[in-house]
Image (spheres, helix red, strand yellow):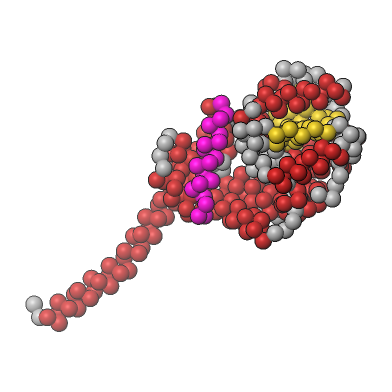
Amino acid sequence: MPSAFRSETKGSIGQAVTVILPLLLLLLLSFLLALGVVYQVLGSRSDERRFPPPGRMIDIGPCKLHLNQSGTGKPVVLLEAGIAASSLSWSLVQPRLAEFTSVCSYDRAGLGWSGSRPSESCPPTLQQMTGELDALLRKAGLDAPILLVGHSFGGLLVSAYAYAHPERVLGLVLVDPISLADWGSGTRSNAQRIASGVKLSRRGAVLARVGLVRAALSILHAGGRWIPKHVGQIAARQGTGLMERVVSEITKLPREVQSMVRAHWSRPKGFLAMAGYLEALPASAAEASEMSVPTGIPISILSAGNATPAELFERDAWAKRSERGSHTQVPSTGHWLQWERPELVVAAVRKMIEETC
């Protein structure tokens, strides 16, 4: 065979490989993505059958919010979750409160079983979030005055609600609330943390659509590490640590609740909602720092054992402004006080009811 012919043949084969190999890789990637989408759709449908909303859906106009009510009697206690948490975060507290009064937990728009706002790409304002809470309470027919309990970012929301509607609030119990001074200060470090969290959330929504988050959470729950590690790295550099912390924290909840939490965080809407709430945090904190809860409203604050001196100082000031304010730090506890020491949250609510009713 002439050398020129051999060279021409090799060149043609090389060109064919150069063209065909990327196409094969593209087809393989497309197949895997399609497989992931199917896995996600089937998994979501299975979740809907296995985990129907335990409460009722209340139409507040922009969307429907999930409200889980239990117990009987007055006053009504309303539980407000943290920035990316749902009504499930009160699973250890709500049943105990229901033993002696009526208690409700709910999912903010986009979280848990609640629907998303039409403009999910825009961060909600503080006025919008407290307005949605007010609409929920009124449309659900919950009689005032109501005792509001808020954890973390939820503490900001219930305090802002008490400022806007003092006549409807019996008292406030704040469980390791966020620092308004810190998050409302607009520092560069906080801005970077917010931007990083938003990026992680939006990438998480993309990965959830193709089933990667669902698969990673399932594997991580079963003890696997390699795949969740790489999924977390795709989302952002700190994604792996966050995913592992989420799974580690929810192990403090009952097993059936853990499965519900993983189901919720396997869907894109939760990540998109979290991005919106994170973006809203600085402006909401700055606005809330200008709102003083009326002095006649009792305030009970529980701080985690790892709260910073600046946080404790700020919360002391909040308690002192109230005519019936108290602030207690709980040793050897972290931010999720209602999971580590639920009986203390219940005791704080019971004491406030006894002193105000």
Residue 141 drawn in magenta: no
Nearer to the camera, 63 or 316: 316
Determine the residue positioned at 77% across, 41% down. Answer: 315
Q: Is residue 65 above or below residue 104?
A: below
Residue 1 occupies which quadrant of the picture? bottom left
Percent x, y of residue 8: 19, 78
Determine the residue positioned at 58% across, 46% down. Answer: 268
Left-right relation of 22 to 318: left
Residue 245 drawn in magenta: yes
Percent x, y of residue 124: 74, 50
- Asked if residue 89 shows in the view, the reply is no
Left-right relation of 29 to 336: left
Nearer to the camera, 69 or 225: 225
The chief SS type of the magenta part is helix
Percent x, y of residue 276: 67, 51
Q: How many marks?
A: 0
Determine the residue positioned at 76% across, 26% down. Answer: 349
Nearer to the camera, 342 or 332: 332
Task: Provide the residue span drawn in magenta.
Answer: 236-254
